[in-house]
Image (spheres, rainbow, N blue to C red):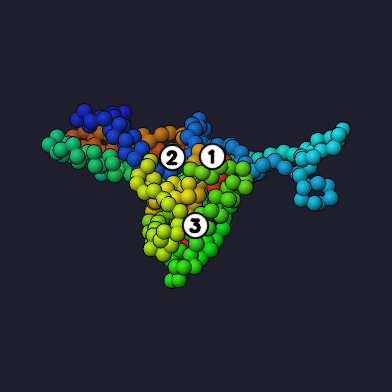
């Protein structure tokens, strides 16, 4: 008789192993505010505006909030929210059948490796979904001053590109200090090559070293995360815990399917969806490669 209610094999807590590997692999989830959802259909609101303000009635770009005359009525301003509907996605994978004989006489590493690789497969897809939502929903986007792989490296101004992204976020009312810069391995290499070998000592100092989950360095107040899940030819600057929310319907979960006399299968799944609630708390740099 099959059973999916077990959580251990030979006394090994598969759930603990899975959650440990999930913490290690889900680097982009650290950018999100984590919230639970009880339903697979999620109704939520996307914030569009930054600071509330209003221009005068003649069309001159001066605020009607400031310098109001005596007995004047206050100007009416309102925040802009757009109602959205999203749906939970399921990420689901299983191992091949591990024979009863192998379970009986093999080392624990065989089982741990299966769990690790299954969790990595699920978490990679979750990570990719989070990035895709951020990239598609970002409110600010600017092309790089020159492609980062430009043959004439002197024309490349990565410092300006990063400062422009930070400026766009700040103008919309969010603090970009400590924001995350998401790069592909290739663009991370191009950035360091340009800053170290082309710009040399003329660039602001930056520190390297792993400072947090997925963070490999810091530059201009931005913490750099490098991942193959980042789309080529672009970089994202994201204010963590503001721009994105991960709605969890079911956290990383495991089940063991017992085929009596034959063996067992390990299944791993997660259900949830990423929402970009504050589109202006992020900025994109495009055209990084020629």
Q: CA distance from mark 2 to mark 1?
A: 11 Å
Q: Which residue is mark 2?
A: 30
Which quarter of the rendering shows the N terminus?
Answer: top left
Please state which of the two labelled residues, at mark 2 or mark 3, is closer to the viewer.
3
The reply to whether the C-beta atoms of the residues labelled 2 and 1 are less than 8 Å apart is: no
Find residue 75 and report its image quarter.
Answer: top right
* Residue 22, image x, y percentages: 35, 39
Q: CA distance from mark 2 to mark 3?
A: 25 Å
Q: Nearer the viewer, residue 212 or 92?
A: 212
- Closer to the chain start, of discs 3 and 1, is 3
Q: Residue at x 62, y 46 (%)?
A: 172
- Closer to the chain start, of discs 2 and 1, is 2
Q: Which residue is mark 1?
A: 242
- Residue 87 in sight in this render: no
Residue 159, numbered circle: 3
Q: CA distance from mark 3 to mark 1?
A: 24 Å
Q: Nearer the viewer, residue 185 or 60?
A: 60
Q: Residues within 10 Å of mark 2 (few under 14, many from 20)?
A: some
């Amino acid at each position: 008789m099959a059973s999916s209610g077990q959580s251990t094999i030979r006394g090994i807590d598969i759930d603990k192993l899975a959650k440990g590997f999930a913490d290690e692999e889900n680097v982009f989830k650290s950018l999100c505010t984590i919230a639970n959802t009880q339903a697979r259909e999620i109704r939520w609101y996307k914030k569009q505006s930054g600071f509330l303000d209003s221009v005068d009635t003649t069309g001159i770009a001066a605020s009607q909030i400031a310098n109001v005359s005596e007995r004047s009525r206050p100007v009416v301003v309102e925040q802009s929210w757009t109602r959205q509907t999203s749906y939970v996605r399921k990420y689901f994978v299983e191992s091949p059948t591990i024979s009863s004989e192998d379970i009986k006489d093999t080392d624990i590493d065989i089982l741990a490796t299966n769990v690790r690789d299954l969790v990595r497969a699920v978490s990679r897809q979750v990570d990719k979904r989070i990035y895709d939502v951020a990239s598609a929903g970002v409110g600010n986007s600017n092309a790089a001053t020159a492609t980062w792989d430009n043959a004439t490296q002197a024309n490349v101004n990565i410092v300006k590109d990063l400062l422009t992204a930070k400026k766009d976020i700040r103008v919309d009312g969010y603090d970009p200090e400590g924001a995350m810069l998401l790069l592909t391995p290739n663009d991370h290499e191009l950035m360091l090559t340009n800053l170290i070998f082309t710009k040399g000592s003329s660039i602001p100092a930056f520190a390297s070293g792993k400072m947090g989950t997925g963070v490999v360095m810091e530059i201009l107040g931005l913490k750099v995360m490098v991942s193959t899940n980042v789309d080529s030819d672009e970089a994202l600057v994201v204010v963590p815990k503001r721009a994105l929310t991960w709605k969890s319907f079911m956290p990383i979960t495991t089940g063991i399917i017992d085929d009596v006399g034959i063996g067992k299968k390990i299944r791993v799944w997660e259900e949830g969806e990423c929402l970009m609630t504050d589109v202006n708390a992020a900025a994109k740099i495009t055209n990084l490669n020629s």
